[in-house]
Image (tube, rainbow, N blue to C red):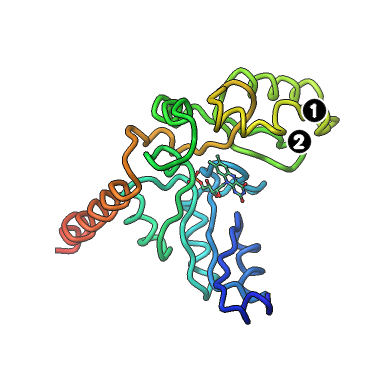
């Protein structure tokens, strides 16, 4: 951390819990990205969704934080700000943009998916990952159920390791497990990043200026 600070680098640490966020604050991070249970990828093992995690982070943290996990539109930005965050971070949503350097099949899969289509894998290994369901993921879940707490990474390695080039570059969507958040249910198009951010900002602004103002009028 001192070397980063001396070089003038701002450090934003990603955390899935309040206790880890506090640790990040203690060791000198400038900000944290607080990742709720909805997130694509590794949500940790506490399973606290952002409706609780963000206001809890706001109760405890002194450094700024952005809301992460499930974020994809202006309603959610307005909500995240109301819950105490200073902004949002988006993972899954940015994959479904024109600029994202991934195969078109990945973008199409995100548009087709609903909020019901993600699964949690590797929980017995305490390395839980939220992924888009596919036949490979169903095989992993069956193996996990069969082996129970006796599961080792060797049992599922082929279905989780080295999968990204096949999925993201070759568009072989069923070759293994790949991270995807519940926000897939809110992804209905493939805008440019500029269009996406402009839309999120104008939707959030409209909500804050009209809907929320009307609430207190
Ligand atoms: C395809 C994909 C790959 C990811 N890879 C990583 C990774 O290598 N390391 C990491 O810390 N987080 C990774 N994440 C998680 C993101 O950094 C971020 O925390 C998450 O996407 C936020 O949730 P959202 O997808 O609902 O926006 C990945 C997410 C996705 C969707």
- Mark 1 and mark 2 in contact (Cβ < 8 Å)? yes
Q: Residues within 10 Å of mark 2 (few under 14, many from 20)?
A: some
Residue drawn at point x = 36 percent, y = 50 percent: 76
Drawn side of residue 65 relative to residue 179, left or right: left
Q: Position of residue 194 (x, y in %)?
A: 31, 50
Asked if residue 29 is positioned above or below residue 129 in the image, the reply reads: below
User: Is residue 26 at all visible to an observer of this figure?
Assistant: no
Asked if residue 137 is positioned above or below residue 152 in the image, the reply reads: above
Q: Which residue is mark 1?
A: 148
Q: Position of residue 152 (x, y in %)?
A: 83, 32
- Quick one: which residue is furthest to the right in this view? 150
**In this orientation, which residue lies closer to the viewer: 10 or 48?**
10
Residue drawn at point x = 23 percent, y = 54 percent: 202
Q: Which residue is mark 2?
A: 124
Q: Which dot marks residue 23?
A: none
User: Is residue 110 at all visible to an observer of this figure?
Assistant: yes
**In this orientation, which residue lies closer to the viewer: 34 or 109?**
109
Asked if residue 137 is positioned above or below residue 100 in the image, the reply reads: above
Q: Quadrant of residue 16?
A: bottom right
**In this orientation, which residue lies closer to the viewer: 83 or 196?**
196
């Amino acid at each position: 951390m001192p070397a980063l600070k001396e070089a003038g680098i701002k450090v934003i640490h990603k955390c899935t819990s309040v206790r880890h966020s506090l640790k990040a604050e203690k060791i000198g991070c400038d900000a944290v990205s607080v990742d709720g249970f909805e997130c694509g990828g590794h949500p940790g093992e506490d399973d606290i969704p952002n409706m609780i995690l963000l206001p809890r982070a706001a109760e405890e943290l002194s450094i700024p934080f952005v809301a992460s996990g499930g974020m994809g539109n202006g309603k959610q930005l307005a909500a995240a700000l109301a819950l105490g965050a200073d902004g949002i971070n988006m993972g899954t949503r940015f994959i479904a943009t024109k600029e994202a350097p991934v195969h078109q099949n990945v973008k199409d899969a995100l548009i087709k998916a609903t909020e019901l289509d993600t699964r949690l894998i590797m929980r017995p290994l305490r390395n839980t990952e939220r992924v888009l369901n596919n036949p490979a993921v169903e095989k992993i879940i069956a193996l996990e159920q069969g082996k129970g707490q006796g599961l080792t990474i060797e049992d599922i390695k082929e279905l989780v390791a080295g999968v990204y080039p096949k999925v993201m570059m070759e568009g072989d969507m069923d070759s293994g497990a790949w991270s995807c958040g519940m926000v897939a249910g809110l992804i209905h198009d493939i805008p440019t990043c500029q269009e996406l951010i402009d839309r999120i900002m104008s939707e959030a602004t409209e909500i804050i200026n009209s809907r929320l103002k009307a609430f207190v009028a």
